[in-house]
Amino acid sequence: MSTKNPPETHSLGGFLGRWIGAPARLQTYRNLLYVLSMFPLGIAYFNVLIIGFTTGLGLTIVLVGVPIVVGVLAVATGLAGFERTLVRVLLDVEVPVERVPNDRGLWTIVKRLVTDLRTWMAVAYLVSVFVFGSVAFGVIASLVATSWSFLSAPLYYEDAPVVAYGPIPRGDFALDILFGWDTLLVGLRTTFRLGSWQVDTLPGALFVACLGLALLFLVTLPLVNVLASVWGRYARVMLTVPRYWRRLAD
């Protein structure tokens, strides 16, 4: 008797089940922790790389900058190893570590560090953490803040009424029929104005709170899983740099 699990189906029902069931999975909150941590970590990575490379390149004329640039590359591979651990622990994505030749001699190790494409992939990955993390943090933080403001509407609707703005129809809908040479176009015509909807009653505030709950559990958390899934695949491709800093310690 076979003990293999049945193949995963990619039907619409399965997708909707995973989307709606996102709040009930522990992995969702690990993904959320990772996505939110990308913003401060990305800022730190970006500052280290920018300060290191600008200082090193600026001092290369007196040869002092060369070891600084090499040191920044070594630090970048170390940070890539740290990111590999975070991706494995929080995103549950295993990133393989490639074996490298057991080089001897500082010059050989430095040469491999500088010329290996995977080193520069690590640098590009760290910069992309800053870019992707800034965008993802802005989107998720905005959704969470909006959800929280909606959820807490029953607590403050009397002191600060909730006001929503949007287009409101100004009149009745009119039926339009247009005749062409060989076509018949039928449509509805109306006019809209920009208006507001104010919530100043408890039932209205409870309705807004339900909207906030739906925004949090049916939009924000599933979106976190989508972002984490995309980033996990990207990290698996980019984080293949070997651990040079261990070679330097030999």
Image (cartoon, rainbow, N blue to C red):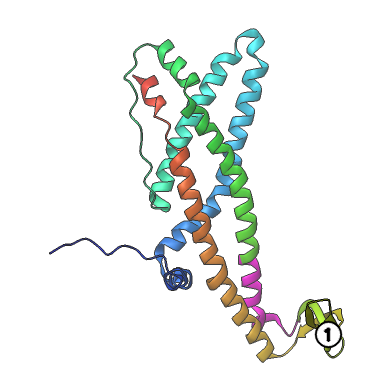
Q: How many marks?
A: 1
Residue drawn 41% across and 25% down? 245
Would residue 157 be counted in the magenta stretch?
yes
Type of secondary structure dominating the magenta stretch: helix
Q: Taking 44 as reference, is 20 left or right?
A: left
Q: Residue extending furthest left?
A: 1
Looking at the picture, how far across and down is residue 127, in whole percent?
Answer: 59, 37
Q: Taking 31 as reference, is 212 left or right?
A: right
Would residue 50 be counted in the magenta stretch?
no
For the residue carrying disc 1, how many other residues have a C-alpha within 10 Å: few (<14), some (14-19), or many (20+)? few
Amino acid marked by disc 1: Ile
Q: In front: 26, or 201?
A: 26
In the image, is residue 101 above or below residue 16? above
Q: In front: 17, or 95?
A: 17
Quarter-wise, where is residue 248 in the image?
Answer: top left
Q: Which residue is mark 1?
A: 177
The answer to whether one can see residue 31 in this image is: yes
Looking at the picture, how far across and down is residue 193, in whole percent?
Answer: 87, 79
From the image, which quarter does the N terminus lie in? bottom left
Residue drawn 65% across and 22% down? 55
Looking at the picture, how far across and down is residue 21, in whole percent?
Answer: 44, 72
The boundaries of the magenta stretch are 144-161
Residue drawn 53% across and 53% down? 35
The answer to whether one can see residue 160 in this image is: no
Q: Residue extending furthest top?
A: 62
